[in-house]
Image: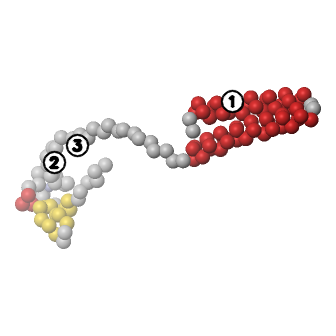
Amino acid sequence: MNKLVGALITFVGICLVLLGAIFIVAWSVENLVTGAVMVLIGAALMYYVYRVERIEAAKPKLISQTYNVTLSGSGAMLPKDMVCKSCGAPIADKDITAVQGGLMAKCPYCGVVFALQEAPKW
Ligand SMILES: [Zn+2]
């Protein structure tokens, strides 16, 4: 229902209820019946608007949103030197061997053997 139409019907309903109340206050049999009918019609109109608003409010609404997302690459790619954990000497490719699925490095200088593990990204 249009907002304006709903407000108009509500306004007419309020006017009918107020006018009906005046008729009831005037107090004669015809006035009482007329006033009661007016109050009932006004109340029915307001209840109708209320119900329609409730039904429309309960319906799911489709909300359209636009997001502008800029994707950029990761940071600069820098080579990471592998060094011995013990003495800090550089480890070359020939010093790394695969043992049972794991990578083992043997320092050519101090002879320490250690496992290479991937550091967590965070
Ligand atoms: Zn070493």
Q: Quarter-wise, where is residue 17 in the image?
A: top right
Q: Residues within 10 Å of mark 2 (few under 14, many from 20)?
A: few
In which quadrant will I find the N terminus? Answer: top right
Q: Amino acid at mark 2?
A: Lys
First in residue order: circle 2 vs circle 3: 3
Task: Look at mark 2 in the image and give the residue it sits on.
Answer: 80
Task: Look at mark 1 in the image and give the residue it sits on.
Answer: 11
Of the pair 6 and 30, the residue shown nearer to us:
30
For residue 110, above or below residue 30: below
Task: Look at mark 3 in the image and give the residue it sits on.
Answer: 74
Q: Residue furthest bottom?
A: 100
First in residue order: circle 1 vs circle 2: 1
Q: Residue furthest front?
A: 30
For residue 1, above or below residue 84: above
**Helix, strand or loop at disc 3?**
loop
Write the residue at 49% across / 44% down.
61
Write the residue at 41% across / 41% down.
64
Q: Quarter containing ligand 1? A: bottom left
**Helix, strand or loop at disc 1?**
helix
Q: Amino acid at mark 3?
A: Ser
First in residue order: circle 3 vs circle 1: 1
